[in-house]
Image (cartoon, rainbow, N blue to C red):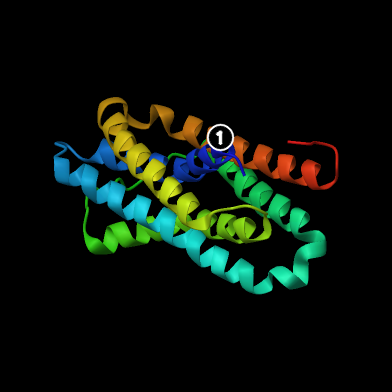
């Protein structure tokens, strides 16, 4: 997996955290440095933890699913991506903006925004040449940065970019899933 592909996956995965950060920024009147650190650490940390867990699970079952691993990777990324696309195109407005950065609030949000990363970790276990340590550190770092940026964007611009972020993230994950499938079926050679 190339660094560019990993970057695209990291950006795609971080779009949920970015969108929630935008909402947090919208509901927080005065941002402080600690807010950026809290949101970045929670979201970046869980975006690193979940693919690690997924990788360990995927590695356990790898031998049994080698014949159709490319289909599993494609389906996982496609389902995650399509879900993000649906959410991005949804006209429903999120209600109940919450400006709390408490342990309870942040842990629930961090888990909710990183479930997708668990499935990507399983996908990593099925792909050749994935350095999982480098991948999870990269994903966590990108998510940390984009979450902090999302907090500021939300504080300045509001919900204007939330849906666009969801759509972009979903499209990226679907396209990477298609690329993996086409490579394994012999239609692409990268």
Q: Which residue sits at x=66%, y=51%?
A: 79
- Residue reaching furthest to the right: 186
Residue 180 is situated, as x and y percent measured from the top left of the image, at 72, 45
Q: Which residue sits at x=78%, y=42%?
A: 183
Residue under numbered circle 1? 4
Residue 150 is situated, as x and y percent measured from the top left of the image, at 34, 35
Residue 120, placed above or below residue 36: below
Q: Which residue sits at x=59%, y=38%?
A: 5
Quick one: 5 or 23, which is closer to the camera?
5
Residue 184 is situated, as x and y percent measured from the top left of the image, at 80, 48
Residue 117, placed above or below residue 153: below
| Left or right of residue 69, residue 137 in this image | left
| Left or right of residue 155, residue 170 in this image | right
Quarter of the N terminus within the rendering: top right
Quarter of the C terminus within the rendering: top right
Q: Which residue sits at x=29%, y=39%?
A: 148
Quick one: 63 or 49, which is closer to the camera?
63
| Left or right of residue 105, residue 112 in this image | right
**Number of on-image labels:** 1
Quick one: 49 or 99, which is closer to the camera?
49
Disc 1 on helix, strand or loop?
Answer: helix
Residue count near mark 1 (Cα–Cα under 10 Å), binned few <14, some 14–19, many ≥20 = few
Residue 20 visible in rendering: no
Q: Quadrant of residue 2?
A: top right
Residue 117 visible in rendering: yes
Residue 41 is situated, as x and y percent measured from the top left of the image, at 29, 52
């Amino acid at each position: 997996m190339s660094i560019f592909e990993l970057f695209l996956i990291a950006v795609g995965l971080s779009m949920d955290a970015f969108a929630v950060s935008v909402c947090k920024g919208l509901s927080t009147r005065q941002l402080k440095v600690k807010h950026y650190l809290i949101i970045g650490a929670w979201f970046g940390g869980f975006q690193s933890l979940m693919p690690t867990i997924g990788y360990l699970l995927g590695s356990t079952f790898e031998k049994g699913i080698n014949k159709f691993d490319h289909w599993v990777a494609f389906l996982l990324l496609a389902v995650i991506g399509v879900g993000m696309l649906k959410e991005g195109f949804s006209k429903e407005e999120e209600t109940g903006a919450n400006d709390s950065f408490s342990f309870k609030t942040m842990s629930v949000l961090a888990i909710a925004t990183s479930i997708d990363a668990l499935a990507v970790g399983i996908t990593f276990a099925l792909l050749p040449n994935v350095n999982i340590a480098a991948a999870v550190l990269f994903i966590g770092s990108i998510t940390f940065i984009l979450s902090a940026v999302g907090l500021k964007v939300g504080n300045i611009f509001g919900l204007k970019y939330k849906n666009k972020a969801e759509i972009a993230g979903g499209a990226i994950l679907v396209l990477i899933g298609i690329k993996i499938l086409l490579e394994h079926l012999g239609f692409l050679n990268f």
